[in-house]
Amino acid sequence: MTPTQLKQLSNDRAQAERILQRTFGHSHFYDEQWQAISRLLRGERILMIERTGFGKSLCYQFPACLLDGVTVVFSPLIALMRDQVQSLSHRGINARCINSEQTPEQNSQSIEEALEGKLKILYIAPERQENEQWVEATRRMPLSMIVVDEAHTVSVWGHDFRPAFRRIANLVRLLPHDMPILATTATATVRVQRDIVAQLGDGISVIRGNLMRSNFNLRVISVNSDEEKMSWLAQHVNDLPGFGLIYAGTRVETETYARWLKFCQVNVMGYHAGLDADTRKQIELGMLQNRWKCIVTTNALGMGIDKGDIHFIIHLQLPASPIHYYQEIGRAGRDGNPTDIVLLYNGTPTADGVAADTVLPRAFIDGAKPSIDKYNRVIDVLKANLLGEQELIKATNLKQTQVRVIKADLMQQGIIREVVINRRKKYEYQYNAPALDPTEFENLRQAKLSELAAMVEYVHTRQPRMQYLCEYLGDQHTGGYSPCDNTTLQPWHAVLDDHMLARIDQFRQTYFPKLELQERKSNIACGVAASYYGVSSVAGMLHRSKYEHGGDFPDFLVTLTLRAFYKTYRDCSIDCVMFIPPTVSGQLVENFAARIASALRLPLSHALVKTRQTDAQKVFQNGYSKRDNVKDAFALSGQDVTGQTILLIDDICDSGATLREAGRMLTAQGATAILPLVIAKTVGNDANN
């Protein structure tokens, strides 16, 4: 359509709804949808804050079909991209996406089609803006509209701030003032709203809808232990109506609770971002088909998936804020049917005096903004050298996520800058740069702690729970609120008896975590651990032996590790047992391996040796440094392993770098298979999505 025709259509809702019926099969717009669409057709800029399931996507998809050119949608949600592209293509609307799950060839094809004017909508992950092909393409692309989905991530005060979104804000400010812009989110406090408007520039109007979800039945169940959470789930999940999601705080929790529910005869699947792309796609498809009773997941699942019949959501871990909580529960009950919303909360004080279920969100807060000494460490390293990201990570011994946060903040303050040398990005200290100003970081940290305190207040409030959430999010609409255990609903309680304790103990002696160690050009297998380190009493036993002169690992650990062996490797023909040479633990692993070998009636080999001294892996904070610490550090002494299958023993597996390096060496020496077996797998960085 021409600009004149678009302007005429923006004043003719009836005509627009006839086009809507033909294109999307809907008979009418909601009033707030039409308000946004009519403004976009006139070239305006809008921030839309509407509840999950409202239909925000239609607000840009409809005008995108009419505008001359391609609408670019920045979204962090790969699942949304897949779902939307499939839906639009089914309606005959040309749409593609660019993200890390696709091959470079697929992403390049999407860019070419956009440049050739073959697409109406192109979805792209914000992080892809650092790709040179994309940067060059945007200069030539016939843009018609820019959409910023999950726009709260633009704001440092938002609940999921991503530095890459700042590049979108920079792009928006460079665009012609009459190009329509739409930013959408379901969760933005007034403070976040103001910051989004400031980031995206002048001329943005705000449409804020009613956040009430009247079909929700909200409850909080107080527990005193993880065992009480396990007990409540085992007794009640199968009785809840329909399909549901159970949100865990970490990947380890996700795997553990999913296996526990399977043990209790619940038809369940586990999901987190550590799964490969094909597996995640299959689970998402199964979710849409109601293949299971529920899915235990981190917050990686649910956002952007159009499923109206999720009828219960259970949180096993306290969300970091009421904003997080509202967004996650907002994925349920979109069909308007009654929906059970349950938060299991352990407020038992820890040794540090904080509630048990606040420990993990506090750790996330600490990780979101590294300490000031880490900022200074990056500055000092860059004063001496021009470094790329990987070099910077290794030079500072910081985690990748920390380095990326620090880089973004230092660039924003003009202390460092990004340069490209031989097509590679480097980071350079700006001499005469201003001194680091930590004020914003500390203010943000205090704001996050206040949000966590507000989530704890939600647990204890006597208000209607939905009223509390809506008021916190700045919703000024008044009216009735959802039923909850503070109003008309009966409270629910967790009961833990001797029978359930026995079942939990039985489960823990049959569930053995996998070690994802397989790699190309190595014959190392996917290994197994007897337990998670830090999840059970195993951690205390290991710590006493390793660091408190407690002697050899106790018999219980030998028995548990043998159970893991028999469950995983029972049918394997093994030639010998080897063990990882010690760094700090003396003969503990050797003695443990000898007891395992004796029980299995296998020969124990002492042929695996170190060629040089290595440091304890736990002192390194990133995978690059852990790999460098053990690279080429192992050799064989006096044994030919050609064609052999080796059971490789260690006490604790963290990143897996040590076992992988030993596996590479043994493969190079002719070993046919290396089967890793350890006492415990660390929880480590499993808190990622």
Image (cartoon, grey):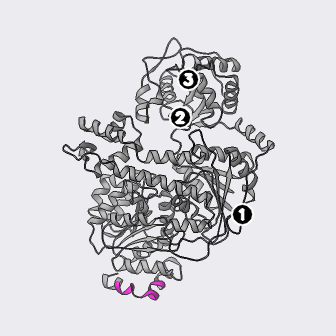
Residue 374 position, x and y percent, is 36, 39
N-terminal of the two: label 2 or label 1? 1
Vertical side of 283 occupied by 652: above or below: above
N-terminal of the two: label 2 or label 3? 2
- Identify the amino acid type marked 2: Leu
> Looking at the image, which residue is at 53% across and 21% down?
580
Q: Mark 2: which secondary structure?
A: loop
Mark 3, residue position = 547
Report, in whole angstroms, how far the alpha carbon at label 2 lies from the one at label 3. Answer: 27 Å
- Identify the amino acid type marked 1: Pro
Which mark, by number, is residue 517?
Answer: 2
Q: Which residues are magenta?
A: 7-17
Mark 1, residue position = 241
Question: Is residue 526 visible to us here?
Answer: no
Q: Mark 3: which secondary structure?
A: helix
Q: Is residue 132 left or right of residue 521?
A: left
Q: Nearer the viewer, mark 2 or mark 3?
A: 3
Q: Is residue 440 left or right of residue 213?
A: left
Q: Is the Cβ of the residue at disc 2 closer than 8 Å to that at disc 3?
A: no
Main SS class of the magenta portion in the image: helix
Vertical side of 60 occupied by 501: above or below: above
* Residue neighbourhood size for the residue with mark 3, other residues' Cα within 10 Å, grouped as few (<14), some (14–19), many (≥20): few
> Looking at the image, which residue is at 48% across and 27% down?
664
> Looking at the image, which residue is at 48% across and 71% down?
56
* Residue neighbourhood size for the residue with mark 2, other residues' Cα within 10 Å, grouped as few (<14), some (14–19), many (≥20): some
- Identify the amino acid type marked 3: Tyr
Q: Is residue 631 left or right of residue 381?
A: right
Residue 239 position, x and y percent, is 75, 59
